[in-house]
Image (cartoon, rainbow, N blue to C red):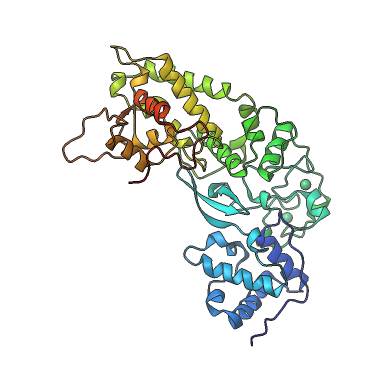
Amino acid sequence: MWLLMKFLFKPEPYPDETLESYLLRLSQDNGFESYSVFSSVLWEMLMERDHEAAGAWPRSLSRVNVYHTRNSSGLRVRALQLIEQMTDLPSMQLLSLSLMGSAARFGQHVAVHRAGVDIPRLFLRTAGVPVCPHCINESAYIRQYWHYHPYVACHRHRCALLFQCPGCEAELNYQLSESIIQCQCGYELTHEQPAEASDELGALADLVAGEPAHSAGSNPLLVTQDQSMRFGALLWFRQRHHQPGMESDQISNNDFSGVVEYFGNWPQSLWQELEETRLTAEYGLTQAYHQTAFSRVFGSLLTACGQLPMRETSKNFILREVQAYLVQLVREHPRSRQPNIGDILLSVAEAAALLSTNYSQVYRLCQEGMLKISKRLGLRQDLHPNLAAFRLRHVVEAKLSYMQSHQDAAMNTYLPKW
Ligand SMILES: [Zn+2]
Ligand SMILES: [Zn+2]
């Protein structure tokens, strides 16, 4: 029988601790001079039990989390389960600290997953990780939300996070310095007195950390208890207001400024914005409405909110409001001899978002004659998902007539499977 070697000192992980922070503390509590020495010893211990899992074990702290693995996440999980046994931790406790790859998507953006919550991978800080001096003074470990871009103030102490070392001005990065309370230059971070944070940044920090907001009012971003949707709404806001038309992966800390106030004026903030967009775009149209693509007027409005990361409107309050606006727009512009804004053309992708469903349901609605294609297709031409082919009016009518209920069913199935 194999005897598993165990560590002498076994620190308890904190529920909001990062996996990297826990492994660093495990290494330090057991007297290793550096993480790389600890990591090689750990590798040998793993090797004795499971050489496959050991083979997939990285030497550097910054590569240790599960989402960094491409095809070998199962092996990384096995290695972490062995470490759980070496530290007498209950099964799954280290895995619950890990960031895993996720099958969910936020529009085109991939996601990671931690303890039941999907997070856009784009939100993970890739270089330095800031700290709250008060927090590390109370308990010296790294909080998971310090790794997320939108989190710039401490929600517990209502102060700004420390991004740079006051001693040497280097960007703080505990994975490089291998220290939680000191900068690489030796500067003690626990004595710092950071600046107070504004109410806006405090509220933003609350919602990123998954806390119930202090005064939510009717702000849907603060009211929703669905943490994945909160991240979805933050991403949507950032795409729409700070990177219009661009899919840049470079996030800056200012990308989320004004977000709490914006959703505080919801839905007027959105409706007003959409009306302005529409009137400006209509002024410059060169073709008749029934030949104009929806995206010419509204850009990526529908596709950007169709999946955040869910498409059920009971949770996705942004999609719900965009749908309400478009239904109202069609109501105000009934069919007439002169084509109007109700006749602009949606693609399969946009129709799927407006119907809260998937592409194959849209194709089926076409085949069953429940959704009319308003574009003449060539003999051998397939209906490409991005081809503007359905009048907005017809999609709205399909939505209103075939919708099974207002509480949309799990996947919004309009038609049963073949
Ligand atoms: Zn703090
Ligand atoms: Zn320093």
Q: Is residue 289 above or below residue 386?
A: above
Q: x, y percentage for residue 375?
A: 25, 29
Q: Residue furthest left?
A: 379
Q: Can residue 409 be seen from the camera position used here?
A: yes
Left or right: residue 114 versus residue 186 is left
Determine the residue positioned at 65% across, 64% down: 92
Q: Residue furthest bottom?
A: 1
Q: x, y percentage for residue 240?
A: 51, 32
Figure quadrant of the N terminus: bottom right
Determine the residue positioned at 53% across, 70% down: 75
Q: Can residue 300 be seen from the camera position used here?
A: no
Left or right: residue 31 versus residue 74 is right
Depth order, front residue of 417/43: 417
Q: x, y percentage for residue 280?
A: 43, 18
Q: x, y percentage for residue 11?
A: 77, 67
Q: Quadrant of residue 7?
A: bottom right
Determine the residue positioned at 16% across, 38% down: 379
Q: Is residue 281 above or below residue 133?
A: above
Instruction: Locate ligand 2 by image quadrant.
Output: bottom right
Q: Quadrant of residue 6?
A: bottom right
